[in-house]
Image: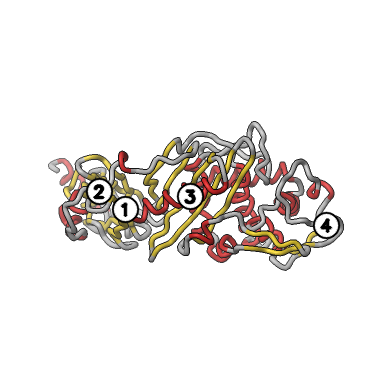
Amino acid sequence: MKFALTFLITLLPLLSHAAGPSDANAPVLAAKAYVLYDYTSNQPLVSRNPHERIQPASLTKLMTAYVTFAAIRQGKLSLNHSVTPSPYALRVMTEESRMFLEPGKPVKIEDLLRGLIVQSGNDAARVLAETIANHELAFATDLMNKEALRLGMKNTHFVNATGLPEEQHYSSAYDLALLAAAIVRDFPEFYSIYSMREFQYNNVKQFNRNQLLWLDPHVDGLKTGHTETAGFCLVASAKRDNHRLISVVLGTTSENMRSSESQRLLNYGFQNFELLQLYKKNQAVSSIRTWKGTESQVDIGFRNDLFVTIPLGQREQLKAVLESKQPLIAPIDKGQYLGTLKLTLNGVPYLDLPLVALDNVALANVFSRGVDTIRLLFH
């Protein structure tokens, strides 16, 4: 059964009749793959080859950090805890990035995180992996891949904590956007590390390779990556007012190119899209008739504040229809999925958003259930 939500449009005051951007207007970047992702509304806005499996290089360390953050929150590690690097962790396989840890010299977890994120140290990644899971391979196959699966990263598989090229080590632009969003959302207490422009350890000062930290005052993270096979890559995030966008650009030809193309993507997003808050958390979108329960109706809405990102000038073209399963029989649990709010833009399907019960509805007594059984025969 469908219910027309004409009242939804009243939440969206009309602005203009100007046409918003189309795919034809979106920038075409000099990169193998890219995604512009709206963190606030959880929407991909622009993409090219978003699900193609590509070697992620040091963008891998986003997951290395994510697993480490989780271990700290769970009490398995503390920032002040010191560990002594193993010979395995300090081995140098190629001309890889390092934070220049010393054999036999203890190092704090806090410094390892800065060395991992700011300096992109492979030695820091391996020490953290060994500290948490005893071995880098176990860290990657058991913990990193487990988190990737939980976050919905369907085209990602890790076999190391550093991002050095291996055949079964891959990710995608869209998956890396999900991971970056998870870092911002799940670990705000650690996110400020990604905005550090430099870090000095063992008398060696190294600068963050994310050039956008200097070029754009709105950018506050996240991570660069580079290998010969992966090219130059960058996951960046910028926040203007209360609107945060994440860009993922993979496989460019130079450091300057990955920065300039990422900047183009972020600028395009902020200049050509607008963020709308349609509903607040637990705000009733509608009420649905219930049967055989202690209440005749139940309010439905969203678990969290609902934001939607649309092209500029398209508010009046946003329409909504609510679909729910009928008849709705008690008992009903708060948070239970009860329907879908289907949004269209210019008559084209845009988003499907799940609606849940905002309250419990208990089963009614025998007499009331019997009455509703009879009523349903004529409904």
Real-space CA distance between mark 3 and mark 2, rounded to the nearest whole angstrom? 24 Å
Q: Nearer the viewer, residue 339 or 160?
A: 160
| Secondary structure of residue under mark 4 | loop
Q: Is residue 99 in view from this perspective?
A: yes
Query: Pointer 1 and pointer 4: residues touching (CB < 8 Å)?
Result: no
Residue 6 in the figure: left or right of residue 196: left
The disc at residue 273 is: 1
The disc at residue 102 is: 4
Question: Alpha-carbon neighbours of circle 3 within 10 Å: few (<14), some, or many (≥20)?
Answer: some
Q: Which quadrant holds residue 24?
A: top left
Earlier in the chain: of badge 2 and badge 4, it is 2
Earlier in the chain: of badge 2 and badge 1, it is 2
Q: Quadrant of the C terminus?
A: top left
Query: Pointer 2 and pointer 1: residues touching (CB < 8 Å)?
Result: yes
Q: Is residue 362 in view from this perspective?
A: no
Residue type of the residue flagged with mark 2: Gly
Residue type of the residue flagged with mark 3: Ser
Q: Which residue is mark 2?
A: 20
Residue type of the residue flagged with mark 1: Phe
| Secondary structure of residue under mark 3 | helix
Question: Alpha-carbon neighbours of circle 2 within 10 Å: few (<14), some, or many (≥20)?
Answer: some
| Secondary structure of residue under mark 2 | loop
